[in-house]
Amino acid sequence: MSKPKVGFYWCASCGGCEEAVVDLAEKILDVVAAVDIAFWPVALDFKRSDVEAMPDDNMAVCFINGAIRSSEQQEMVELLREKSQLVVAFGSCAQLGGIPGLANMFRRQDMFNEVYINTASTVNDGKVFPAVSTNVDEGTLTLPLLWDTVKTLDQVVDVDYYLPGCPPPVNLITDAVGAILAGKLPAKGSILAPDIALCEECIRRDTKPDKLSLKEFKRPFEIKIDPELCLLAQGLLCLGAVTRKGCGAACVKANMPCTGCMGPTDQVTDYGAKAISAIASLIDSNDEKEIEKILTNIVDPAGTFYRYSLPASLLHRHYETSYEGGRK
Amino acid sequence: MSDNKSEEKRFEPKIVAFFCNWCTYTAADLAGTARMTYSPNVRVVRIMCSGRLDPQFVLAALRDGADGVLIGGCHPGDCHYQEGNYKAIRRFRLLKKLLKSMGIDDARVRLEWIAASEGDKVQKVINEMTETVRKLGPLDLEPKAWKLIRKTQIELPKAPQIALGGVS
C-alpha cells in the first residue's frame, strides 16, 4: 500500500505555524517516513496546478493554517478541500481567526489608508491602493481581492479537526499526526487538545489564592512581575482560567500572562464573553463607580479578550466605520 | 421621531430581558397581576440570579436579532444568593465597555435593580428601554455580519494566475 499523502498550506498567517512543523525536529523524519508530502509550497516546490491535477480526495489530510481574508485564499482552500479526505485547521488563525482576525476591528479602506497613506515613511501622492486589476503597458496585472472581513477556515470550507495554539504545540501536532496515521480519530469537529483550562497544568497553580479578588488590574510593563506567584493574583490579565490547556503554560513559564491562543474549551461558544465573565467577577468591589475605575486599566477590551478569536466570536466584527477604542 | 410616521412604519424594537427569579421576575409578575400596561417589545427570560447571566447570553441575543438587552436583578444587598448581583454588575460594566469598543451603542444594554414589590418600576423601565432602543433603530447584527461576508464572495474576480503562498 502506498503511503498516505499529506498537504500543508498557509493563508493569512505569520508563518509561525510552518515553523511549528519544522520544530518537530527529528520527529519530522518519522512523519516524512510515514507519509508522502503531496503539497507544501512553503518548503518544497509545488504549484497550484499540481493540486488541480490531483484526483478528488487524493490527500489523506491537509493541514491549513491562517485565517481566510482574500479571494485567492478562498479558492485555494476550496480546492484543497476537494482534494483532501480530512482538513485540519492548524493553529489559532485557521481555528478562530487569530491575530489577522483583529483586522475585523477596521474596514478595508481604513486599513488601506493607514498602510498606504498615513504611515510616516509612506510617500503615495497618487493615492495608489492595491487593485484587483491594473492596466500597464505590458498588459493587465491582477491581485487577489482583499476582503473587508476576515473569516475563520470553517466559515469558508468544511473542517474536520482543529489543532489550536499560536502556533500549535509540538506534542499536540505529533499526537494528531499519530492519530490520523493510526486512524484513531475522535468525532468530526473535535479539537485535538485536552478539554481543560490552562490553570490545571500551570506551574504556578499552587500559588493561586483560594479566593482571588483584585482592586486593580495591571499591565505587564507597569510592574516587576514576581516569577513564582500566580499572575492573576498579581493583578495581571492572565487568561489561563478561560483558555484550553495543552501548551504547558509556556507564556507563564516565561513570566508573561496567558493571552488565550489555545482558544476556549468545548463548553464555551464565545471566548471573549467568557473571559469577561471570569475576569470581571474577580473585581473586589461592590460599588459601581469603583468598579468602573478598576476597569479603566483594561484599555482595549476587544483586543485583550478577542486577541485570537474575533472572527469566531458571536459579534464577528466591529460595526462602525471608525474605531475609537484601544488605539490612538 | 416615530410620532410623525404612520403606525405601521414605526420601528418596533425586539428586546430580550433576563430577569432574576427572586426579585425582578416576581416584580414583572406583580405588574401583570396588577394589570399595569407596558410596551409589548420585551421578551422575558427568567434566570435564577442576575449573577447567572453569562455575557455570552447577551451577545447571542444581540447577534440573533435582539435590538436591546435588559437585565433585571435584586437591589444591592438583597441578592437571594448574597452576592450574585454584585458579580452581575461587574460583568455588565466590562461587557458594556466591550460593546462600545465593537461599535455597538452601549445604551442597547441596560441593567436595573428591581425588587419584587416594584411592579411599577418594571413598567417604567420597560417603557423607557423600548423608547431608547426605538430611537437607536434596528441593530440587525446577524444579517449585517453575513452580508459583509457574502459581499466579499460576490465580488470575487476569476483571477487567471495566482502565485502560491497566501500571505501578501
Image (cartoon, coloured by chain):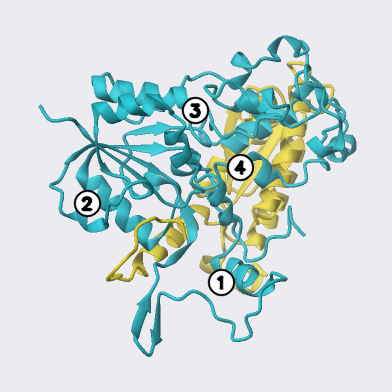
Chain colours: A cyan, B yellow
Q: Is residue A63 left or right of residue B96?
A: left
* Residue receiving disc 1: B6
Of helix, strand and loop, which one carries label 4?
Answer: loop
Amino acid type of the residue tagged 2 in the rendering: Val
Q: Nearer the viewer, mark 2 or mark 1?
A: 2
Are labels 4 and 2 on one chain? Answer: yes
Q: Nearer the viewer, mark 1 or mark 4?
A: 4
* Residue receiving disc 4: A306
Q: Nearer the viewer, mark 4 or mark 2?
A: 2
Circle number at residue A169 = 3
Mark 3–mark 4 CB contact (< 8 Å)? no
Q: Residues within 10 Å of mark 1 (few under 14, many from 20)?
A: few
Q: Is residue A13 left or right of residue A4?
A: right
- Residue B10 visible in the picture: yes
Of helix, strand and loop, which one carries label 2?
Answer: helix
Circle number at residue A178 = none
